Image (cartoon, rainbow, N blue to C red):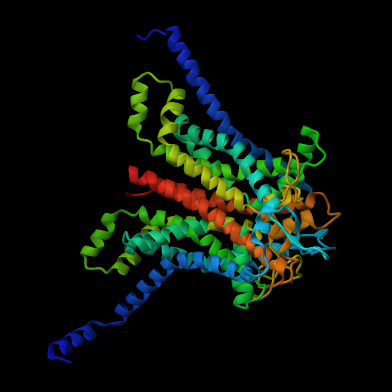
Amino acid sequence: MFVTTPFVRQKERRELFAKIFFGLMAAAMVLPLVLILTHLVYQAWPLLSWEFLSTNPTNGMRRGGIWSAILGTIYLVGLSLFVSAPIGVFAAVYLNEYARDNWLTRIINLAVVNLAGVPSIVHALFGLGAFVLFAGIGRSILAASLTLAIMTLPVIIASTKEALGAVPRSFREACWNLGATRWQTIRRIVLPNSISGILTGVILQVSRTAGETAPVMFTGAVFFKKIEEGELFAYAITDQCMALSMHLYTVTTQVTNTPEALPYAIAVVLLATVLLVNAVSISIRVYIRSRKKW
Amino acid sequence: MTRIGRRRAEVWFRRLSWSRIGEAVIENLIRLCGISAVLFVFGIFLFVFREGAGFLFDGLDIEKFLFTTEWYPTSRSNVRYGVGALIVGTFSVTVLAMAIAVPFGLGAAIFVSEFCGKKLREALKIVIELLAAIPSVVWGFIGLSVMNPLIQKVFNVPIGLNVFNGAILLALMSVPIMVSIGEDALKAVPDAYREAALALGATRWQIVYRVLLPAGKNGLLAAVLLGVGRAVGETMAVLMATGHAVNIPRTIFDPVRTLTATIAAELGEAPVGSDHYQVLFIIGILLFSITFAVNLTADLVVKGIRKKQ
């Protein structure tokens, strides 16, 4: 039997203290999230309704809903992922399946890391300089989506690489031994076995893209644009559009005399979208992990 | 062509089928996509540089640009482009944010990797992920509408939009990345170290600051650097929450303006091609260089750890 000497007791006390100390630091991270969410929802409550989501803003943003902003965000997110997902996945396939350990690979990896660290406002400058002005696309959904696509690219590459890396090497070797070529192996074995991981990474980007403001502010998003309510194809890709994130910014900083709940309601809609998408992606990941066969 | 050469060509042609061509096309496409990241980084630098180059080499006094604090880009009589105050603004908000975020971020990373059970760890990681997902414009809005009155009341200051407000938001925004990278760094410390310390009778507290912190210091440094990179480049939150006054702050309750916020606020109004417009792009180059250097250092630090293992 162990005897609890004063020394042991002191040690246990210290241990407990350490645990509580670091636990509080972790709690300091959880607490703001909970407080902020409840506060925002509480303030936004009076305005949240189906009508708010499905009507256009009127009276200089002071009345009506946010339909055109929601649709604009859907366009921007959809188009940007349509561009960045294939490029990102292929780039990750290259890095994980084809690239040897040489200087080119090292440079590519370095570029991916740095692309991920470029500030969003610099992406905005790039989008303006390259797509809007140099390529002559003009401020439009297309230019804004391309800017967002380049911004999301490194994260898609990173998550896809992780998903591809989780496929055991023996799977590939077995396939090569049957005489399959590299690409056949990738198409028939590697991609099917990692597709769920790749998709989770891409879905996660939906939430990041939806929240971005700075890159779209100068490349395609506008203060106000009237569109047909309930019409899903109301924007053309050469049109400018409204975006949820930008709408929140303009309503909070540039419109006066708005109803108090309005910016809160926009923030809640934006947050709900983002967190919902994240929750979906997290649960898919947990589900996949629980039934992984190897 | 020799006979053997011709035979070889015939065999090659016989083997050549559509699937073969398809495969070659796809492989090259994949290679191109792989290289695209490099092209984009160059592209970003090139196009931002291209827009600002004219004024950078002809007309801008770089010394005055960097070291004076007078930012009057639209003045009629005497236009002055000094980003000194903006650099100080960015710097002050970032430093204060890091002073708040580093202890909490690393503390939370230590808790997640050393002190909590598996279930709690998974739950905390999900919370961290959700925290990281909150868009910066929502943080900005929180700063403007929640923190602003709160700071005025609690600290009894006239303006709630200031360095302190922005720093708290940036701290909350950069904590998630610090926790996840920091946790990786701590996980990379071999278990044998912990066991050896335990065998010597060390408490967990002692293990943390005598064993884990020294052993994982490079990874933790990388975590902090990535947090710094994020904080320097953050735009919307600081645009909305720091008060937007070109000003060298004396206390943490003074409003400031950052490099990023200046671009975001003025780019819409500067006529394309004007000096003002070009100066904003030059600020972009400055930002790009700062974050590039920070990220590069972080990457080298991380690589250094991997090599050692």
Q: Nearer the viewer, residue A281 or A109?
A: A109
Instruction: Determine the residue positioned at 30% across, 53% down.
Output: A168
- Numbered label tally: 0
- Along the horizontal axis of the image, is B39 left or right of B135? left
Residue B8 in percent (x, y) is at 17, 85
Q: Nearer the viewer, residue A37 or B65?
A: B65
Residue B258 seen anywhere in this rendered image of the structure: no
Instruction: Determine the residue positioned at 69% across, 44% down.
Output: B166
Q: Quadrant of the N terminus of chain A?
A: top left
Residue A243 in percent (x, y) is at 69, 62
Looking at the image, residue B264 lies above or below residue B107: below
Instruction: Determine the residue positioned at 19% across, 84% down.
Output: B11
Residue B52 in percent (x, y) is at 63, 68
Residue furthest toward the left?
B3
Residue B30 is drawn in which quadrant?
bottom left
Q: Nearer the viewer, residue A252 or B215?
A: B215
Residue B80 in percent (x, y) is at 75, 60
Residue B7 seen anywhere in this rendered image of the structure: yes
Looking at the image, residue A280 lies above or below residue A99: above
